[in-house]
Amino acid sequence: MPCVAAFAASPSAPPETRNYDQILDTVVARYHLPGIALGVIEHGKVVYIATRGETVAGSGQKITPRTLFEIASNSKAMTTALLGRLVDQGKLHWDDPVTKYLPDFQMYDPWVTKNMRVADLLTHSSGLPEGGGDLMLWPEPNAFTRADIIHGLRYIKPGYSFRSKYEYDNLLYVVAGEVAAAAGGAPYETLMHREVFQPLGLSRCQVGEWNRDTVGDVAAPHSRQDGRNIPQQPDNPVVPAITSAPAGGIRCDLDDMLAWARNWLVPTPAQLQWLSAEQRHVLQSPHMLIPVSEQRHNWDDSHIMAYGYGWRMTDVDGTWTVWHTGTLDGMYSELMLLPDRKDGFVFLINGEAESARTVLGEALLKHFTQPDDTHDVTWYADAQQRADEQASKRAAAPDTSKATAVAPAALAAWTGRYRDPWLGDLMLCPSGGRVRFAVAKSPRLNGDVMRLGNRDLVHWSHHDMDPDAWLDFHPAQGGQPAMLTMAKVDALGDFSSDYEDLHFVRTGDCP
């Protein structure tokens, strides 16, 4: 099994391996990635492993196949596998109502509450707006518990009717983790170790509290600033359990992710005992249609795309694919399976890499689905860049560099204490000659109030918080108190910054 750890391709490597080297090195160079780990499976066997870069930019500590990365939403398939285990054990049924396990569970609509099944938690078709309530999960750290999330759901207004369309959400995967805990009789983290990691030999995957120095070899996320990769806040020596784990909080290394992938492509008899063929089929079957983008249709000749339970699936050049991506601030990943061919690949990146992920995933996928494709990495990268630029022009995000700090006197009519029913308390109060915006349960949601033209916005204190948000004040009327609503300054900003779902009501004066 070739293992390439240097930046240069090995001149003695087989032609197929050199091709992977070329794809990888071109992507790393084009996007200036701080670090990446890539593994490829052909006919059920791992044929290629390569790593590039450092765990922390400038540290000299090289990425290895045992470097831990945040796998983000690739955690969802592990959560659904856990649920499938409980179904096999007779402790749970997909059609059970969620309230059977979580009596306090409520959605905004009482009818939806009554009819929400365990399966409905997994298909992104609940009615929650895209990314609805994600501000209870991110940015981390924050003080929101899983009980807070279950309680907060009842206040988030639906964006569409139940089961009618696909809109990606994370909160209901956190709920699914709590359903697993209730059905399995142990905390989600305990069940994940016992029912998934240990039986499959995923010895370095981490969830819950763990010791950074004991585990060792941990990649840090990076942001891209002024042409450099900047490490974000490092982990504490004791990494705490996080509320978001069932939706996107698991960490694994490349070796374990390849073992996880092979479990789906070429399961051993023992693995088929671990999870039945019936449940494997359920997890990776289409349950909710997803619109096929124009780019995907043009690049891949795709005609259908769907979501299963923790997996996406689509046809690519006539080949069925099952896959998922993972996205966190400074961490990107992709796991791709071609089940009928028993092929696949996994890569993990510790930097800002949305376009890099798209291009690398496409170039690797074409190696399998259309090996005679004449488009190289540079062609796909150039095409993606054009698409990104066109999207940015359509969004036309305003230039906020000329925004100026708002003096407390200019905002005196609106300063005070506010409360949103699910995000909680907000202080909008004078501090040091400025007006500060500070959410009580999410300490990174704080910043200065600025003015651009005739509109107010909050400029976040933490540089990795993006995008900034408009602040729109609504006067008291009809016996109702003043209100504050918000919206992303950049309409193309991360959907998890779901400011549009917030409705703050003024509750009092500043201290």
Image (cartoon, grey):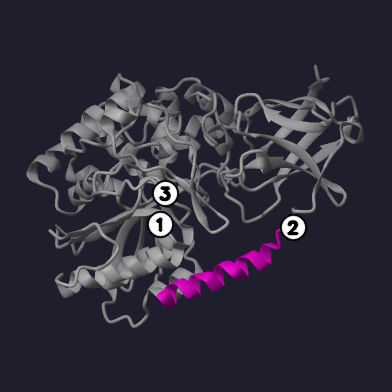
The disc at residue 57 is 3
Q: Position of residue 327 (x, y in %)?
A: 45, 48
> In the image, which is nearer the foreground, mark 1 or mark 3?
3
Q: Is residue 205 left or right of residue 405?
A: left
Residue in the picture at 64% in, 64% down: 392
Label 1 to label 3: alpha-carbon separation: 37 Å
Q: Position of residue 492 (x, y in %)?
A: 62, 56
Magenta-colored span: 378-400
Q: Is residue 484 left or right of residue 490?
A: right
Disc 1/disc 2 C-alpha distance (Å): 37 Å
Q: Are marks 1 and 3 in contact (CB under 8 Å)?
A: no
Amino acid at dot 3: Ala
The residue located at (14%, 42%) in the rendering is: 271
Q: Earlier in the sequence, mark 1 or mark 2?
A: 1
Does residue 286 show up?
no
Nearer the N terminus, badge 3 or badge 2?
Answer: 3
Give me the residue at 55% from left, 70% from top: 387
Dot 2 falls on a residue whose secondary structure is loop
Categorize mark 1 by other alpha carbons within 10 Å: few (<14), some (14-19), many (20+).
many
User: Which label sits in the foreground, 1 or 2?
Assistant: 2
Query: What is the three-letter code of the residue carrying label 1?
Result: Ala
The verdict on residue 397 being magenta is: yes
